[in-house]
Image: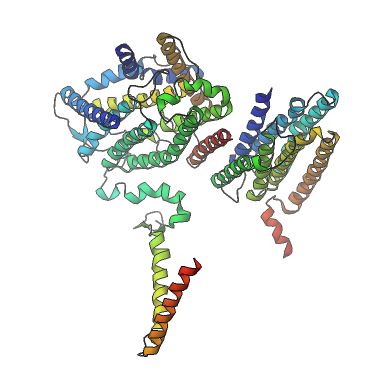
Amino acid sequence: ARVSAIAAVLLATAIGLVLLRRRLARAPAPRAETWGCGFAAPTARMQYTASSFAEMLVGRFSWALAPRATLHAPRNPFPTEALFASHVPDTVLDRLLLPATRAAGRLSALLRPILLQPLIHLHVALLVATLVLILAWRFLA
Amino acid sequence: MASLTDSVFILVVVLDLFLLSSSRLNAAIRGVALQGALLSALPPLISTSEHDTAHTLLLAVGALLIKAVAIPWLLFRAIREAAIRREMEPVVGFVPSMILGAAGIALAFVLSRGLPLPSAGQHAFIVPTALSTVWTGLLLVVARKKAVTQVMGFLVLENGVFVFGMLLTGIMPTMIEAGVLLDLFVAVFVMGIVMFHINREFSSLDTAKLSTLKD
Amino acid sequence: MILRAILQVGLLLLLPPLLPGVVSRVKARFAGREGPPLLQLYFDLSKLLRKGTVYSRTTTWVFRAGPVVGLAAIATAGLVVAVAGERALVAFTGDFILFAYLLGLARFATALAALDTGSSFEGMGAAREVTFASLAEPALFLVLVVLARATGTLSLSGMLGPGLATAWGHAAPALVLAAFSLFVVALAENARIPVDDPNTHLELTMIHEVMVLDHSGPDLAFILYGASLKLFLFGAIFTRLVLGFRFESLLAAEAAFVLGLLGFAALVGVVESAMARLRLVRIPQLLVGASVLSVFAMVLLLG
């Protein structure tokens, strides 16, 4: 209940501040350029991206995340083009689960000609073996 | 004054953490010197009335002179003569070594209550501090590349052994501790001479380069 | 009761702008200058409230909501902080988590507003601020956990209240280490040297200042007041932690608290004058060092 009281105070303060700001402003606010650090003609491509935002943290944990980056650095005094792209693959999925499932697929491809022959006594033998194992488990555990 | 002794022990452990995290050689050597000075103040604080006061004071002053004055002076001179760069080069980075050191210190404090050591009753912090300092010394030897920092690691290791010796002041005479100090003094002296020679031969004190000897 | 509540809210709302004035004055005196007047931030705030606002063409409602949500969150966080050793206005078990996350909400709003402008400069500041905050928050929580363990309660009012005096009696070294860690966290969260330089406006060295470059008029007033309020909250906890003893009368407690708070601001000024800003790669080491000190304090308390 106290937490809801605090949340209510938070909302009320926020709304109060918005109303205060609206009352203080006499004329509608003019529009201007964003601070571009002195660059004269910024375009939408020059804005801050998500990978730049995460770069510091990803670098600190690069031993776990293993980011991949492609870089064509600008050369020569008047470079024509340059490229940088970075990409963080999903570590557990790409490095652990997918290779594991691929290995399991290969293993089953090897076993398939052995196990799926139309031999009834082979299938029955497998069934009996599994049943014996389950019964023995109950007595061993 | 039990709490003053406890504060000294805690300050020694805090200095351990500082040594693991500092990246400049000068600050680290001063930290080791301060740790030595703190430890040399321990015999007068811990000794009970059955010890000879003059002996204890002599031991304390001797330890102070050697740990806090002579050995750091030797190390500073070694740095100046060999013109070593002022930064420590880590094999294990500073943050991982700090975390490892903290983990070792925490383990030392938790596990030392189970160790059956004599006369640890009135000063409960002796054994954990000793274990932590030994662990820090070993970590410094393993985790840094320069030979100077390995000497510092040995110094910190000896500080830890010195704190262990505090446990036995009631049982063994204090002369044994003076002997340990003298041993180390000779060891550091020899190491200093070895470092001069290494530097003269290879013009660098990076121990990774010693493996080029085999070509 | 009502008097106590009014006194607490009054202190919370009126005192904060004095603290940056004290810090600037101490820094100026260290440099041999006279320095700005102590009440400078009050004058700045009233001037900014009267000015008009200019918005950038690239911003949306997120940018306008940023300062408002930030100030509201910090002011609400002030409700759970125990001022001068009395019970906070709203106190319950686990309110320190609410405190930490309200401050986190304020930081989130400011960073979002900075990213909304689309300027790479401000985005860089937001990235740095968020990365360092992710390291400072465990340190803050560890300090609060050490306090909780030492006093045996899980509420900020209990941690900073009458139980603190007995805690100092039997766990003094751990509390000294926790106070040191808390000071480092306070420097980091309030963008002070050695983590950030509040005076420089160079790309190399800015973290917090960069995020608020585009705000103007009342928005900037909200941001500046919110920053001083955050400094006040951290100073309140630190002062109460250091001056742990009980006071007999309400007036003596409040007077000691205000004096302690001014001392905290002076200490911040001294640290700012004596040190240089650390390189960006060293700041994680500093914050991890503060966390490790708190862990050591916790180990001392466990024994």
Residue at (39% x, 14% y) in the render: C38
Please tell me whether residue A50 is drawn above or below residue C38 in the rendered image. below
Type of colouring: rainbow
Q: Residue furthest left?
A: A27
- Quarter holding residue A21: top left
Residue at (41% x, 27% y) in the render: C156
Left or right side of C93 for A3: left
Q: Residue furthest bottom?
A: A119
Please tell me whether residue B43 is drawn above or below residue C263 in the rendered image. below
Q: Considering the image in quadrants, where does the N terminus of chain A appear?
A: top left
Please tell me whether residue B187 is drawn above or below residue A134 in the rendered image. above
- Quarter holding residue A80: bottom left
Where residue B118 sits: x, y (%)?
A: 75, 37
Asked whether the viewer can see residue C25, the reply is no
Where residue C177 sits: x, y (%)?
A: 55, 30
- Quarter holding residue B210: bottom right
Residue at (41% x, 59% y) in the render: A91
Where residue C142 sits: x, y (%)?
A: 47, 36
Q: Tell which of C283 and C181 is nearer to you.
A: C181
Q: Tell which of C299 and C261 is nearer to you.
A: C299
Left or right side of B77 for B50: right
Q: Tell which of C138 and A43 is nearer to you.
A: C138
